[in-house]
Amino acid sequence: MSPAASAARLVGAATALAAGALAWSFVEARWYALREVSVPVLPPGQAPLRVLHVADLHLTPSQPDKVAWVRDLASLDPHLVVDTGDNWAHDDAMGPLMTALEPLLARPGVFVLGSNDYVAPQPKNPARYLLPDARRAPARPPHQLPWRELVRRLTSAGWLDLDNRRGVLDVDGRRISFVGTDDAHLDRDRMPPAGGPDDARTRADEPVDLHLGVTHAPYRRILEAMHDDDADLVIAGHTHGGQLAVPLWGALVTNCDLDPARAKGLHGWPGPRPDAPGGAGSTWLHVSAGLGTSPYAPVRFACRPEATLLTLTAVPG
């Protein structure tokens, strides 16, 4: 075979491989997965606590399969639901979103908003996602989504709004305090002060069993502030797990200043996991790869869309 023919065959094979990978990425974006992890973070002797983490649905009206899948998560019987934002991506998604969340809204829950809860996504060059910071001034004013109505519906159902707020819930016989921030990707984050009247840990007559941090985008400044706030576990989304990952390697980007090694899953901050060597001073950190994508980039590769059931267990005595 001549060199020209060999080169042509290699180009053809590479083109076929790329086309196959692209086709698969559209399929994988709708191949939803439930992740289950255990976090030893409760006081010694306590029974396990099931926390369902949902993130980055980016729901549009044309996704009934996602709506049904999210509704079915209620069958896991979580004690607490944590929603870390970017729930929708379309003006007409309020109805489908409420249908998806309806059975979960019957459970105790907390939420924060992400950038795409405030404004609709816009077409952009997907290569920007590979930059260290993909933000830029929009070419035209962003279209506002009805986020105030979304907040009203979630809070009316009993969920706590943790956007730059603190809160407390009694969940399955445990008293849990929360600290949350609004979306750092839009620079809307303001860490609420510790020790004030909204900090449940100041109530000596009602001690808390667990202190959770909740944020949409896990920027380092947020993680450092929540670590300093003595959060036992920080829960975040936003990264999409890198969305396009390299098999056997992982994420290349996080769309924030978090390192790619922590793009999804259970980790520690600022060091290793608290149960790993050298992790004694770390806070537990869970980052979800989320369930959706921008409608202008509806692909995933080696990074399935996910929700996570976190089973919180007692610290070994």
Image: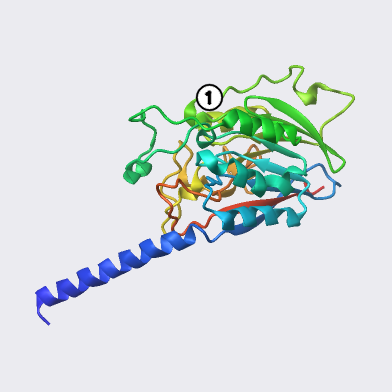
Q: The N terminus is located in which quarter?
A: bottom left
Note whether residue 84 is visible: yes
Q: Pinpoint residue 62: horizontal percent, then vertical percent.
A: 52, 52
Where 285 falls versus 72 (above or below)?
above
Q: Write down the quadrant of residue 148 in the picture.
A: top right
Mark 1 falls on what kind of element?
loop
Q: Residues within 10 Å of mark 1 (few under 14, many from 20)?
A: some
Q: Write down the quadrant of residue 300 in the picture.
A: bottom left
| Residue at the extreme top of the image, as rendered | 196
Which residue bears the numbered disc 1? 188
Q: For the point 69% across and 35% down, which residue is it?
A: 154
| Residue at the extreme bottom of the image, as rendered | 1
Tell whether 103 sits left or right of 260.
right
Note whether residue 275 is visible: no
Q: Pinpoint residue 96: horizontal percent, then vertical percent.
A: 60, 47
Q: For the point 33% across and 30% down, which residue is it?
A: 139
